Image (spheres, grey):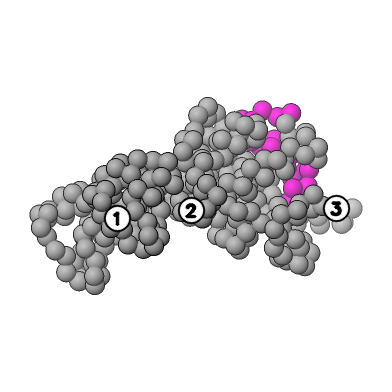
Amino acid sequence: MLRRLFAIFVCLSACIVGFAQMKWNSAYQAYIDQYKDLAIEQMIEHNIPASITLAQGLLESGAGRSTMATQGNNHFGIKCHNEWTGPTMYKDDDAANECFRVYKHARESYEDHSKFLKRPRYSSLFTYQRTDYKSWAYGLKRCGYATNPAYAQQLIGIIELYNLHQYDRATRYDKYIANHVGSNVSRGTIGHQIFYFNDNYYIKVKRGDTFKSIGKELDVSYRKLAKYNERDKRDVLHEGEIIYLMKKKTKAPKEYKYRPHVVKAGESMYDIAQMYGIRLKNLYKRNGLSPDFVPKVGDVLRLR
């Protein structure tokens, strides 16, 4: 009896600690913005709630920042098990030096997560509606997906804090983003990873890139790419430059409302506009500057 009461106490303590520490943060929101279309795609194809997929991805990968995610593209902490024949990595978990699956890119991890949950062990989950995220969360814990006694409560907490259940009713998604986001492999060659910032997607230029080569790889008009980035389609691109895949916004994200940019050595107005995903003309306008203004080190620019 005492052991049972102690176990209940430990479980409740873990839940209380989990909820007390759960606060909104920008890294989690950025992860959601980046992968929500991929989660919705998996939901429509496999009937797994997008909210559950996103919450598990957030929790298991630390919003994509864990070692398994950054080095192995494993967003769901899926271990090797007997049937896995792909590449692996080893990490201490429930036991020392456990085997985990390694994927080519995040998309492959999301697809394998869906297949993993279609195994007989998790068949009871599919008796729930895909809008019933609470039953799915408790069902995952009951089926043994994780050993953490507060796992279900943590998933539910994340879903409700970030309003992820809104995606469980989605009937469409951005197929372009779902096909490309988080992928380092394109048409059999090493491609560009797609990042998300300021309600936009971007890549970083590699040596030898042109607007035409990027457009061909990502299946988007190179003329539009140049226009979105306020450039000429024939411009020479330099390694490390940011190239946005959609039209830029008129102002920076809301967290920059009271955080102006202080100009550093070598920065141009265009560099700063690209850094924050802002249209260049709007950066000039927001600061009451003429298009021929050249910033100096130490100048302070409003971003929003």
For marks 2 and 3, give the one nearer the viewer: 2
- Is disc 2 placed on a helix, strand or loop? loop
The kind of residue on which mark 2 rests is Gly
For marks 3 and 1, give the one nearer the viewer: 1
Task: Confirm or deny contact between disc 2 and disc 3 (CB under 8 A).
Answer: no
177 is within the stretch colored magenta: no
Q: Which of pointers 2 and 1 lies earlier in the amino acid sequence?
A: 2
- x, y percentage for residue 43? 60, 34
Q: Which residue is mark 3?
A: 4
- x, y percentage for residue 29? 47, 49
For label 1, the crowd category at 10 Å Cα-Cα, with few meaning under 14, some 14 to 19 and many 20 or more, is some
Picture residue at 70% right of the left edge, 40% below the top: 115
The kind of residue on which mark 3 rests is Arg
For label 2, the crowd category at 10 Å Cα-Cα, with few meaning under 14, some 14 to 19 and many 20 or more, is some
Q: Which residue is mark 2?
A: 191
- Residue 274: mark in rendering: 1
Magenta residues span: 127-147
Q: Is residue 105 above or below residue 223?
A: below
146 is within the stretch colored magenta: yes
**Mark pair 3, 1: CA separation:** 58 Å
